[in-house]
Amino acid sequence: MRSDADAVLTVEHLTMRFGGLVAVNDLSFLCRRGDITALIGPNGAGKTTVFNCITGFYRPTEGMMTLRQPEGGEFLLERLPGHAINWRAKVARTFQNIRLFSGMTVLENLLVAQHNRLMRASGFTVGGVLGIGGYGRSERAAIEKASAWLERVGLLDRADDPAGDLPYGAQRRLEIARAMCTDPVLLCLDEPAAGLNPRESHELNTLLLSIRERDGTSLLLIEHDMSVVMELSDHVVVLDYGTKIADGLPEEIRNDAKVIAAYLGVEDEEVEEVEAEVGV
Amino acid sequence: MSAVHPTSVAPTGDAALATDREAAPARVDLGAAFKDAALAALVTLGLAFPILALRTREGPTGGLILDQRWGLVAIACGIVFAVRLALRLAGLRALPSRKATRKAVVATGAAAAAASPALRFEQAALPLFLGVAIFFPAIAYLAAGGLTESRYWVDLGILILTYVMLGWGLNIVVGLAGLLDLGYVAFYAVGAYSYALLAITFGLSFWICLPLAGILAAFWGIILGFPVLRLRGDYLAIVTLAFGEIIRLVLINWVDVTGGGAGISSIPRVSFFGLPFQAGEGGFAAQFGLDFSPMHRIIFLYYLILALALVTNFVTMRLRRLPVGRAWEALREDEIACRSLGINTTNTKLTAFAIGAMFGGFAGSFFAVRQGFISPESFNFLESATILAIVVLGGMGSQIGVAIAAIAIIGGPEMLRNLGFLKAVFGEQFDPNEYRLLLFGLAMAAMMVWRPRGLISVREPSVILRERKAISGSLVKEGHG
């Protein structure tokens, strides 16, 4: 077991209540730097709620989420305002139902992702309107970076098409590229393989692995496709009814009786036992 | 679909990395363009000579008198020359990007996508509109046959341009940022009263009051922005509507400052950079050795509002290409995604309200200096609705669309005054004036059936990598607060 010091994200005692409903109950886990951590669980287990807490869309009822930068800085995510989680703590995310700017071009989508840096370059608009301060250079650099990402996700020839015109798989890849344009230290992916065909799913795996290798970004992903989880992840956290039921290496999770019962289904020989229990 | 595979991406990244048309290498052959424009003007001269230059009319004794109208011919040739030259220059500047398009198409094997007709229309219409707008007083003078006679037309031009400017200002809030604002007239009122009160109380000149009025209106835009930040859609519309009414009611009831319902009169009139438009010594006419005419002031006002409107347009076009403009449009498309990308949505919304309000304030102070009298009556809800109708009819986010819509909505009912021929159909008692708003309403309804997303419903991208493609309005979201 490695120490906490190389954890990029530490979640401690995270609890989220909506009125009487406890969506996440006393959850603690950590994502190590350079790892791909998978968060799995049956539908309604609270996985997306955990994501929304980490990325600032919900304010958790209890708990602490610490994000450590490579240089050593620390941010308490539950205390940051929503937009600062991306801009200062460098946590990016994608959404379960894709949220692209569909009426803007693919390239514009990637430039919006570099908003804060460009905003500074344009002298918070004043210099940009007056045409002073070398905004053009920064914009060209931003386009360069966007082109590099488009090339990596295979969308360079569609750069000037509206994002809403892209096929589903391409929209998923564009959303990942857009999140990566914010230079995150932690990228949270909410079901990235949902709705992809086997080939697209395989390409996605390659892309995610290259993000980890080349960009040094740690990944946290929610996924239902077990083949993706088993192939990619270094570490798996299993949630059921908002509570963590298992946490470990993929092989350990695969053989964990609790996980099998809750998520992957029960063993064949136990079927009769379970049926008797529920009274079929 | 071969485009999915990363290896099929064509190596044309260096082909053209043009951020916009300015960045493309513009090798404009000025000489050829001038020659071409001169040729077009010559053809016009040939055509205009028999048609425009000579007119016959019946003299007092019954004989025919030949009128010579060389001024009209000169104007026609001048317009053709200017428009042709502008078109040539625009066409030449667009050329490099078109070449790059062809290269990209060959390289990637993608389906050939010609520049959309809507974009070409915009490129062609812009110089035309600009030419007509610049020469409008001269055209009115020649068409009406005299300086004083042209007053109606120049006044109408001023009115239309005021609404063009207001439409462009509101377009930032509604069209770009997608925030439905039904109380825009409040900022128009703030601008008008700012000028009136500052000019009367402190004796400040128009050119000092103009920026102050804009700043005050922007300040009130932020004041309105704060409470409505969390509201969306219908709720946002209702609160902004209420804000407009609050401002109007304050103007009516705060009699000590605003003069109440009686308004403020004898607001200092505009001067020609210090020279007053008045008869006698020291006036504009005397200084330039002209005969005094009240039309000098009107024509100056026309060019003043034209300049203000063009500044509004220029700034808006520039803002669209800056990060703040892209953030506005992204906010209209998806606010949650914006937040996840680190965009401070609060500040972005406030800047949209403030900048939109600032242009409303500029227009307001122009309104005050033109009328010389303002009262709360001028700033009722109908004004807000008219400006919003201009933005929606024009196509949200489209600058040229808003200009055309302003001409149609403000100029249209005026044009319908001249429906005398209907008397031939319905008899002598028929008064076309009473039906003009009905006809106008019908035309608007037909418009919205024919083009539900406004006149210009395509969105032009703010930045291009290789080729300029219009974005269909069906993909662009309207915003929901």
Image (tube, coloured by chain):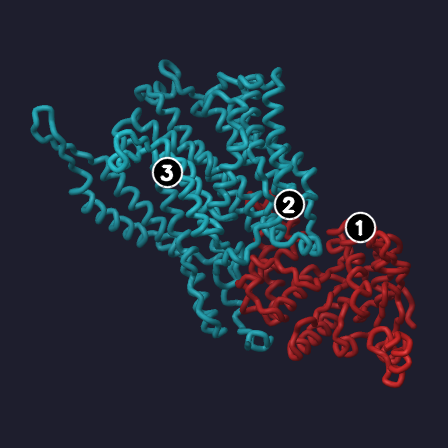
Chain colours: A red, B cyan
Residue A80's disc number: 1
Label 3: which secondary element: helix
Q: Position of residue B113 (x, y in %)?
A: 44, 66
At horizontal 52% and vertical 56% (from top left) the residue drawn is B461
Residue A124's disc number: 2
A43, A121: nearer the viewer: A43
Which residue carries the number 3 mark?
B134
The answer to whether residue A1 is above or below residue B394 is: below
CA neighbours of label 2 inside 10 A, class few (<14), some (14 to 19), many (20+): some
At horizontal 63% and vertical 51% (from top left) the residue drawn is B331
Tell me the CA gap for discs 2 and 1.
22 Å
Residue B399 visible somewhere in the drawing? yes
- Please name which of the two marks, 2 or 1, marks the residue nearer to the observer: 1
Residue A37 visible somewhere in the drawing? no
Residues marked 3 and 2, same chain: no
Q: Quadrant of the N terminus of chain B?
A: bottom right
Residue A257 occupies quadrant: bottom right
Q: Position of residue B465 (x, y in %)?
A: 53, 62
CA neighbours of label 1 inside 10 A, class few (<14), some (14 to 19), many (20+): some
